[in-house]
Every structure is written in structure tokens, then in C-alpha cells.
Image (cartoon, grey):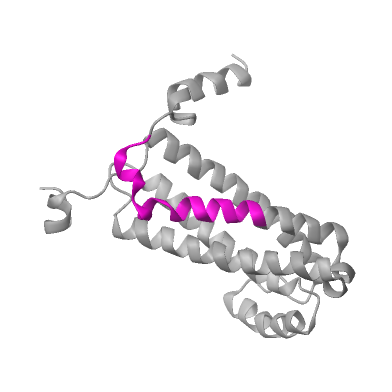
Amino acid sequence: MNLTRRARQWLGREITLEDLLPTSMPVYVDSAAYLFGAAALATLGLLALTGLVLAVFGPGWYHASPAGHFVNSLHFWGVQVFFASLLLHLLAKFVMAAWRDGRWKTWIVGTLIFGVAVFTGLTGFLSQTNWDSQWIAVQAKDAMNALGVGAVFNTMDTAQVLTLHVAVLPAAIVLLVLLHLFLVRRDGPVKPMDRRWRRAGRPQ
């Protein structure tokens, strides 16, 4: 049996077309608590688009050109909205105990996305190519050494930082987000906690 057939059979067992492209959603998904993940996903798309434009035109454009300033500002403020949405999404799912009913894999993948996103944000600040990025690089170098990763990650190495920020870490985030969405579609949105969970913290 070849890999293509195995992959097709596995996907057929794990997810249906209705799961992948649902025509209706449960009524409880109308709650605002379920919007933060969608907001983070939409902002991630904006960050990918503006980041691509910034990488193509380079620092000489986004530091000196009015259009470059605008795109740079979109990218910067998009990061703020992205992390705000991500934190609210994480907090909402924590309060809802979203790891219930066998959804612990979805929870773990979401936590990994948050961790990779934090490191991506750090490399973004290091990639600004201005005085702020130089100061942050000098200060962060000691923190990386204290964490024991200074031998493999040098905050003063612009080429390494830029490669991580525009290629390696975004690819990791996209793959993790796709896996996260696959698990959500396969298992469905987490249900609100019933009175048994709210009263005792666990089912009786």
C-alpha cells in the first residue's frame, strides 16, 4: 500500500467533508468566547501579508517611505491585536476547561502555538533594524545565555534572527495552526461546561 492511499484512508476515517466545511454550527458557538480564536487567525493572515511586503521591499523602504511606514505600522499593531486575541482565546478556553472530552491534543497544540508566537515576536523586535532592535538584542543576549540557548541562538546575529522570523518560525506557526484547526474540525467546538462542572469542577 502506498503512502498516498494510506493518507487518503486515514483522512477519511478522521474527518468528514461536513467537519471540514461545516454548513451549520452549534448554537453555543454564537457566544463571544468563541470569537477570539477567529480574530487571532484573521490577524495572523494580516501579519503574513504585511510581513511579506516588508521583507520584499526591505528596511530602506519601511523606514523612509510613507507607504513603508504605513505597512510597518500595520504589521506592528497587527502583532498587538494578534497577541491580545491569542491571550483572550487561551484564557477563555482555560476557563471553559477546553481539554475536556478528549480534546487535550487540541489544547496542547494551542499552547505550543502561543509559545512559538512569543519567540517569533521576540525575533520580530530584533529584526526592526533600528536602535530599539540593537538595544533589545544586547539585553536579550544575556537572557538567552541564562536560558542555556545562547550557543545556538545569537540575538546579535541579524541573519540568523531574520531567517527565524521570516521563514522558520512562521512555517512552524502555520503548520501548528493547521493541525489545531484540523483537531477542532474533527472533534467539534468545545461545549460550554454544564452545571456539574461549574459546581464540582468535574463531572459527577
Magenta part of the chain: 25-46
Residue at the image position 37 percent from the left and 37 percent from the top: 188
Find the residue positioned furthest to the top.
1
4 up-or-down from 20: above or below? above
Q: In this image, 28 relative to 71: left or right? A: left
Query: How many numbered marks, from 0 up?
Result: 0
In which quarter of the view is residue 67 placed? Answer: bottom right
Q: In this image, 70 relative to 171: left or right? A: right
Judge by depth and name the residue closer to the eye, 28 or 132: 28
Residue at the image position 64 percent from the left and 79 percent from the top: 145
In which quarter of the view is residue 4 placed? Answer: top right
Residue 157, x across and y down, in percent: 80, 72
157 up-or-down from 29: above or below? below
Judge by depth and name the residue closer to the eye, 78 or 92: 78
Q: Can residue 141 be seen in this view?
A: yes
Judge by depth and name the residue closer to the eye, 174 or 80: 80
Residue 97, x across and y down, in percent: 29, 54
Magenta stretch prevailing secondary structure: helix
Residue at the image position 61 percent from the left and 74 percent from the top: 148
Find the residue positioned furthest to the right.
60
Q: Is residue 16 visible?
A: no
Residue 149, x across and y down, in percent: 64, 71
Q: In this image, 148 relative to 138: left or right? A: left
Q: In this image, 85 relative to 134: left or right? A: left
- The quadrant of the rendering that contains the N terminus is top right
Residue 21, x across and y down, in percent: 49, 29
Residue at the image position 16 percent from the left and 57 percent from the top: 198
Q: Does the magenta stretch include residue 28?
A: yes
Q: Does the magenta stretch include residue 40?
A: yes
91 up-or-down from 110: above or below? below
